[in-house]
Structure formats: structure tokens, C-alpha cells
Image: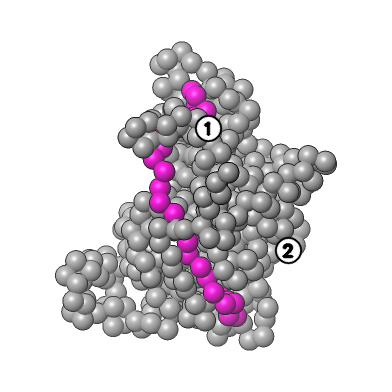
Amino acid sequence: MTKAEPRTLFDKIWQNHVVASQADGQQLLFIDRHLVHEGSFHGFNKLKEKQAKVSRPDLTFGMVDHYAPTRTRDLNHTDPAIAGMITQLEANCLANDVRIYGLNDPRQGIVHVVGPEQGITLPGATIVCGDSHTSTHGAFGAIAFGIGASEVAHVLMTQTLWQKRPKTMRVRFDGRLGLGISAKDMALAMIATIGADGAQGHAIEYAGEAVRALSMEGRLTLCNLSIESGARCGLVAPDMTTVDFLRSRPLAPQGQIFDEAIEAWLSLDSDGDAEFAREITIDCRDIAPIVTWGISPEDALPISGIVPVPDAIHDESRSAHIREAIDYMGLRAGQPLSEIAIDRVFIGSCTNSRIEDLRAAAAVLSGRKAAVPGLVSPGSSVVKQRAEQEGLDRIFIDAGLEWVDSGCSMCVGMNGDLVAPGERCASTTNRNFKGRQGPKARTHLMSPAMVAAAAVTGRLTDVRDLMGGRA
């Protein structure tokens, strides 16, 4: 009997889901969870054209998030186009017996917040959604990735998907995080190190002492940003932190079945001698609070840094990118990042809108006033309710920020929450592309605590300067 070849966590999950293989390397995967939202209407339209129904409605979950209005839940007082997108999703789910967390459901929220919160996301699963930040769910030790419109239709009709297996890559974070440093800083540091396409064609497994020390909320943030490095997905091996989070979640296994599942989940780990196509180690002692200055998540630097000087960059392509970014962002080469004034702040999105994120921002804002306006949108109605029970809403409101309902909100602006043209926003979101938060809007990405610090001072600020002994 020959010894089994060592396998990575990714390989184990992938191989457990292969239904068929083709000579060109494509493999048909069974999909355990399919998450749909308002943008999935193309897939449902394909079903109608073929007079077909959703193959596995029990494994399909609808979420109203991208177009969810955050200042009213009455669609009669909402833009008709936005209301139409929401009612269309609700009708498609109803016609196909698909469970939906609709606009007025007390569990409604951003798909990548609700999935883990409700116990839909489980270790060892394959999870897809027509949204690039589906990589978030990999925090539970799952293979989760975004898919296109035609792929959404294929999964709706067959509960399977043809894919080519990506290469594997391990990113190890050694050491412990310093005061005021979060998973958002870890992710931005990695992207700045390897570039926006540095992990292209790979599945990233995050490992190391700092990753193990993260809460599930932190791991979700880390995996969420995997796509911004070009990765297909990101994963963290399950451990007791994972198990404790899932215990008693509404749709997670219960009782004896849960106890039996624990053993299976904890066995999901890369073999000690498993080989990765690429390995990177980042020393957490080198990570400071990070902000982006340009038009890509890789345009990220410690808050103590300066806007790059394009003439000092020998790489012509990179130098041209820096010039373009400086022009769009209205900055000057060599300008200290801590001198960049902002016009508003946003706390929310599938990256940083969970209860831990809101607590971190509130800890900085407590007893202080914001120098600029801002919006705080919790990741789900459940998070909103919990934040209000803890009094976090009062901290935000007393500081002068607007406390609204849950949804994707100002991350992508589909619901009407926008940054005005030319305005500069300190944001907890995941992308700082041109126009991402609105036409000609300028976005600086950072952690919730860093956004809170910027709100207080009216400029990009090292949150550690404001902590003064605060936890």
C-alpha cells in the first residue's frame, strides 16, 4: 500500500467535490451553497428562457443587499429602479422556493455577513455567489469564490460548476499584531507586498500565529480581501475559534450532529509536508496602521509614509500608474499621508461592518466629535440590533455620524449612498477604484479604527495617537 500524497487544505476540499473531469483540466464541482442577490437576475432569466426551476432550492439562499436602501425600508419611498431590483429578486426566489432574507426580514444584510451569521457558511464547503468578495467565506475553511452571470445560471440549473483548479499559495503571518493593528492592516500589507495581481491564479491559505489569534470577524476581513491580490479565493483552516462561532447558529448543525461535525471540521488542515506552488512570510512586527493613497488596493502604505514620487520609480509602468493615481486623487508627490484632509467617512461593507468592527470604531469615537460627516451602515439587521443593545449607535450619533440600516451602501453606491464628485472619503470598504463610491469620488481604504480616527481629526491619522490607553 503506497503512502497517500500530502495535500493542502484546498486540495482536500476540492477533491471532495469533484464530480467529473475533462482532458483540458476542467473539473465539474458540486456546489454546497449558492448565494444570490439582486444582481443574480441574469441567471434567473436564463432559467425562465429554458422553462427550468432551481435545481436545489434548499442549497440556494437569496439576500437583498446591493440595492438595499439604508434610510428607509419602504420601497414606495425609494427610487423605482432600486425598488424594481429588490422586488425582482424576491419574486424570483418565491417562484423557485428559494429561502430569501428580504428587505424587511429581521435577518437581512450583506450576503457575506449573513451567510456566516446564520450558519449557512460551513467548513469544508464549496460556496459561490455572483459577487467577487465571496472569498470572505473561506475564513471558515471553505472554498468560496465569485462567479459570472452564465455561471450563476449553470449553478441554479445543475448545482454544479466547471472550474479549473487554481494553484495553491500559503501566506504566513508570523508574530503578533501590535496595538491598533487589525486584520485590515494585515490584508493591505500583503496586497502592497505582492501587488494587485500577485496571487493571480492561486488559492491562498492564510497561516501563522497572527492568523490563529484572529477572531472569526478578523479572518473574514482577511479572506474578503484575497480577491484584491488577484487570488481566486482565500482560506483559513478551521479550529476551535471556528467551532465556537458556529455553535448554535440557526442553520448550522445542531446537537449530536454538531458534535460529530466538529471532528470532521478540525481534520481540515494542510498536511505538514504538503507543498504549495508559492509561499510568502510576513513579519507582523513590520505592519503598521495602513491607508491607501491611490486607485488600487496595492497603493497602500503605513500612515507614517508619503505619497510616492513617480520620478523616483524606475519601473515605467508603475511610475505611470502613480502619476495617474496622484492626478485622480488630487494629491501631490511626496505629500505626507497624515496631512491628507478628508471630506467624509464611511464605516460598512462586507469587509468591515460586523459587530467587532463597529466596536473598534466606537472605542475611538466615544466621547469625541467627528470633524467631518459620515455614514455607519452595519453589515446586517442582526448586527444593527446588537450594536444598539450595546449603545454603539449612540456613540456614532453623538459623534455626529449618521446611523443607518444594513446593506452594501456606500461601498458600491448602487442604493444611492454616494460620495460626491471630488470628495475624499476615509472608508472601511475593499476597493478604491476610480468612481467606486461615486463618479469622481476619492477613496482611502483603512480599518474601522483608522476611519474613526480620521473622522475625529478630519485627516488621515494614526489611530494609535488617539488611543491613549484605550483598548
Q: Quadrant of the C terminus?
A: bottom right
Query: Vertically, is 37 above or below 304?
Result: above
Magenta-tinted stretch: 155-181
In the image, what residue type sits under mark 1? Answer: Phe
- How many marks on residues? 2
Q: Position of residue 426 (x, y in %)?
A: 45, 67
Marking on residue 30 = 1
Q: Nearer the viewer, residue 250 or 122?
A: 122
Mark 1 secondary-structure assignment = strand
Query: Vertically, is 425 above or below 164?
Result: below
* Residue 415 in view: no
Question: Badge 2: few (under 14), some or many (20 or more) residues near its Cα, within 10 Å?
Answer: few
Q: Position of residue 323 (x, y in %)?
A: 21, 70
Taking the spot 42% from the left edge, 34% from the top edge, the residue there is 27
**Is residue 93 in the magenta section?**
no
In the visual, does 330 lie left or right of 26? Answer: left
Q: Which residue is mark 2?
A: 391
Mark 2 secondary-structure assignment = loop
